[in-house]
Amino acid sequence: MERIVEFVPISTPPSWLDRVLPGSDLSSVEHSERTWSFGIGAHCRISTEGLWRVVASDGIKVASEDHGQMFGGAEPTDALDILARTLTGPIWRVKVESLTADLRLDFGEAALEFVSTSSGYEAWRLTTRLDGEDLELIGMGGGKLAVPRGQRA
């Protein structure tokens, strides 16, 4: 029987968010037809079917919609390669935009941003394990945040 999880809105990012991401590296990136999945450290994963982008001091380096595009070059854009070359070093800051629930992970010289583009569809889903507890945070449509009912926030 499938387990049904009820999510409840929260007004601010959970306190555990600053414990699980800073100091961690981008450990993996997987891409299927519609979903991007980013491994952070040993126990954290951020998944999205929405827009993400990598921003540096000189502008946008790559975005989810760029993957496989030719842009007049000889080879299609390989977002996986650009991610690996650009997001080096550990995360030093995490920010969740209060009005949009956009999630920003600052890595050394560049940042990975998960951008909410809908009033209804979720933008991203973060799952992690901390102190033996499975935790989840969702960037909901309309710029809201949610966690499973009963989970610490």
Image (tube, helix red, strand yellow):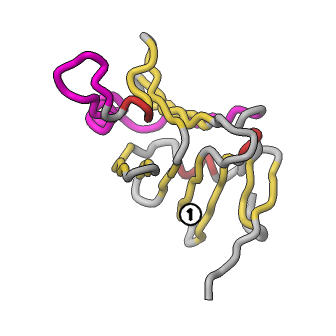
Residue 131 image position (x, y, % from top left): 57, 67
Q: Please, what is the three-letter code of the amino acid marked with disc 1?
A: Leu
Q: Measured along the vertical axis of the image, is residue 52 above or below residue 48?
A: above
Residue at the image position 50 percent from the left and 30 percent from the top:
106
| Residue for badge 1 | 130
| Residue plotted at (76% across, 34% down) | 98
Return the residue found at the far bottom. 1
**Dot 1, how many residues are within 10 Å of its Cα: few (below 14), some (14-19), or many (20+)?**
few
Which quarter of the rendering shows the C terminus?
A: bottom right
Residue 20 spot, x, y in % from top left: 54, 52
- From which residue to which does the magenta span run? 69-98
Left or right of 41 in this view: 71: left
Residue 78 within the segment the image draws in magenta: yes
Q: Residue 15: x, y in percent?
A: 70, 50
Secondary structure found at label 1: strand
**Residue 44 placed where, x, y %?**
48, 56
From the viewer's perspective, is residue 128 above or below residue 24?
A: below
In the image, what residue occupies the spot 59% across and 53% down? Answer: 125
